[in-house]
Amino acid sequence: MTLAQAQPQPSALEFDCDTGNYHTFCPISCVAWLYQKIEDSFFLVIGTKTCGYFLQNAMGVMIFAEPRYAMAELEEADISAQLNDYEELKRLCESIKRDRNPSVIVWIGTCTTEIIKMDLEGLAPRLEAEIGIPIVVARANGLDYAFTQGEDTVLAAMAQRCPTVEEAAAKQPAVAKEEAKGGGIQKLLGLGRKKEEEVVVAEDTPYHDHPPLVLFGSVPDPIVTQMTLELKKQGIKVDGWLPAKLYTDLPVVDEGYYVAGINPFLSRTATTLMRRRKCKLIGAPFPIGPDGTRAWIEKICSVFNIEPQGMEEREAKIWESVEDYLEIIRGKSVYFMGDNLLEISLARFLTRCGMTVQEIGIPYMDKRYQAAELALLEKTCNEMGTPLPKITEKPDNYNQIQRIQELHPDLVITGMAHANPLEARGINTKWSVEFTFAQIHGFGNTRDILELVTRPLRRNNNLKDLGWEKLVKEEAKV
């Protein structure tokens, strides 16, 4: 594949698909942030030793931390169907219940369970009834899903467990009775959480009368608080988050409820909420960067016929506060190889920062779920006077390397596998996985995104200023 030279710029976004293969981090890594987010959960990854080695190395959890996840390692006898799947999983789940007593056990299927056709969805209901703990089944295999889509499959499975209005009402007397039985210790355990909720509601802004709104996407608690307060400033009440801090606090989701996503890789969850629970999806750009956050809030306001207040001034103030970072990247070019499905949102944000996006590689593209984000990307490119980037789904890494060598971008955002080879060829790189684990949502985290983006540029500029000879001498002394 060769690049066409001196061609007229396209008037609309151009889409392409290279190979049909995923070149991404393994989706079972979603366990890393989900087990910390859902505090009463236990994740059981069912796979081979390779999956176990990946989790050990990729997640780097200390041995004393006692994380709430484990590997159910499939041996030769399992794979050749010499053992009874149900009995083996029952033994493991009874051990988990005895040792940890979680509110939910999440089975994470892997490539191996797909290949040998383990019927996890068929086994789970029977075992759930027997041991008395909910068992949620999520497929997170690298054959069908890209890196962050592991979270998508888990949340889609949990969305079907969210109570309806009737179920929540029926459950309420039983919960009150349990709390009365629990006495002082139950109050003590719930004290911190209730206090936190009171702080969020303590402001004087009145809520508008609007249909219930549930937000979905696993983000750290500070971002949950920030985004809830941002909407509260507009008089919009958030009725719940999926996932909640506790599985027992899953939000009520019923027909006619409005839902909005906070991450661009949750298309399956959105589809489940619309089709299975008859919810109405608010199709908005995602709250990454001040431009995306403003568009996200304004879209939610428009759906509820609310006039947003102070958004333009708020966005302008954030841009002004990060001018020192913008000076570093303004006028430079960036290339996305594709890994975590945040590429469209980040490309739109960096275009607004003054960068030129040469190409956006993305493992999976759901044009319906990301329609508002794509429209905002196109609008941003036109307003900033930069060419519209080509979007390549499931990119072939070999072809990408050829294009990168020809384009020679100032920065390549890539998976870890290609960072060092590109650096050796004199190209600045940034690991895409860092954006997955960093807090990048909302107005307040704009500086954190730009810190990640500019770090390799600042580092390599410093190395050039220092001079290679002096650097070698310093390393020799060490």
Image (spheres, rainbow, N blue to C red):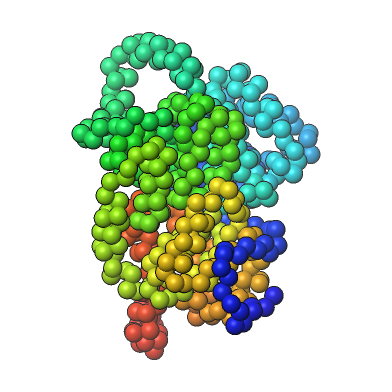
Residue 362 in the image: state x and y as whole percent.
58, 59
Q: In which quarter of the image is residue 45?
A: top right
Q: Can residue 36 be seen in this view?
A: no
Classify 15 as above or below 95. below
Nearer-the-camera pick, 205 or 407: 205
Classify 233 as above or below 355. above
Q: In which quarter of the image is residue 459?
A: bottom left
Residue 93 in the image: state x and y as whole percent.
58, 28
Residue at the image point whose x is 27% and y is 41% from the top: 233
Q: Can residue 284 be seen in this view?
A: yes
Could you tell me which quadrant the C terminus lies in?
bottom left
Residue 347 in the image: state x and y as whole percent.
47, 63
Residue at the image point whose x is 46% and y is 13% from the top: 170
Q: Quadrant of residue 394?
A: bottom right
Could you tell me which quadrant the N terminus lies in?
bottom right
Q: In this view, does 427 lie to the left or right of 209?
A: right
